[in-house]
Amino acid sequence: TQLLEQSPQFLSIQEGENLTVYCNSSSVFSSLQWYRQEPGEGPVLLVTVVTGGEVKKLKRLTFQFGDARKDSSLHITAAQPGDTGLYLCASQIISSGSARQLTFGSGTQLTVLP
Amino acid sequence: NAGVTQTPKFRVLKTGQSMTLLCAQDMNHEYMYWYRQDPGMGLRLIHYSVGEGTTAKGEVPDGYNVSRLKKQNFLLGLESAAPSQTSVYFCASSYRHGGTGDTQYFGPGTRLTVL
C-alpha cells in the first residue's frame, strides 16, 4: 500500500490569504485525486491529475502534479470561509499485482476565519 | 437521485454486540466500497465489491463482513463489536474500480461508538 503524506496537518488562516497544501509519496502515482470533506459529510472529488507536470484550475483552486508524479499541491487564492474543510489526496498505486484500490492521505484540516 | 445513502447515521454499541450498516446507491454503479475514517489516519478501505454477489478484502478487513446481494445495496456487518471499531464509516460507489479518472461518490457517513 502506498503511503501518502499530507502537510500541513492543520492550517488556520484569515479570509483573503493564499495557501498551499501538499501531498507527497516515495512511490510514483498513476493518478492523484483531491477531495474536500465538510463536517458531517463524505468526501467530494475536486479534481484528478494524471500527467506529470499537469496543472488544473477550479475557480480559485490550482492543482499541480509533480513532474515525477510523486507529489502534488493544492493552492487556494484569496481563501474564503466556504473553503473550510478537510482536504484529502488519494491515489491508486502503479502495481499490476495489487488490487485497484484508492489510498488516502490523512488530510489537511483547513479553517478560514472571516 | 439521492446518490449514496447510509443507515443509520449514528449508533452506540456495547462491546460484543452485533450490527449491520446499510449502504444504498441509485446511480446503477457496479463498484461499492466501505471505508472507515479515524482521526489523523484518513480513510482506510475495509471491503469492496466489483458487482452483485462479489466482495473482496481491503486494507483493514478484520472484524467486518460484507454482502452485496443486490446491485444497489452493500451491507457492512460487525459480528462482535470492539472499542477499536469506534469510527466513522463511509460507503462509496463508482462506475469502475478506482481507476484513473474514476470518481467515487461517498455517502454522509455513520458515526459508530463502541463502549
Image (cartoon, rainbow, N blue to C red):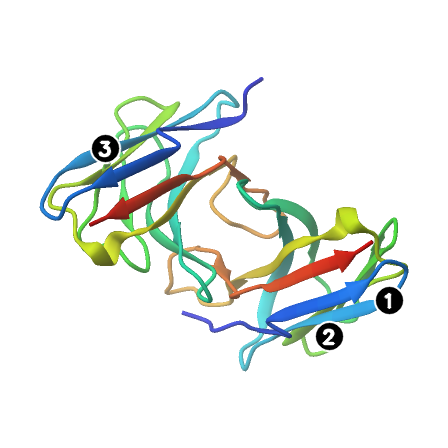
Q: Is residue B58 left or right of residue B83?
A: right
Instruction: Give the quadrant of the N terminus of chain B.
Output: top right
Please name the residue that numbered disc 2 is placed on. A66
Neighbor class of circle 2 (other Cα within 10 Å; few <14, some 14-19, many 20+) is: some
Q: Are marks 3 and 1 on the same chain?
A: no
Q: Are marks 3 and 2 on the same chain?
A: no
Q: Residue at x 47, y 73 (%)?
A: A3
Please name the residue that numbered disc 3 is placed on. B20
Are the residues flagged by discs 3 and 1 in contact, CB closer than 8 Å?
no
Residue A28 coordinates in the image, percent (x, y) = 58, 75
Are the residues flagged by discs 2 and 1 in contact, CB closer than 8 Å?
no
Q: CA distance from mark 3 to mark 1?
A: 44 Å
> Label 3 is placed on what type of residue?
Thr
Secondary structure under badge 1?
loop
Q: Residue at x 77, y 70 (%)?
A: A20
> Label 1 is placed on what type of residue?
Asn
> Label 2 is placed on what type of residue?
Gly
Please name the residue that numbered disc 1 is placed on. A18
Which one is nearer the viewer's eye here, A7 or B13?
A: B13
Q: Are marks 2 and 1 on the same chain?
A: yes
Residue A30 coordinates in the image, percent (x, y) = 59, 64
Neighbor class of circle 3 (other Cα within 10 Å; few <14, some 14-19, many 20+) is: some
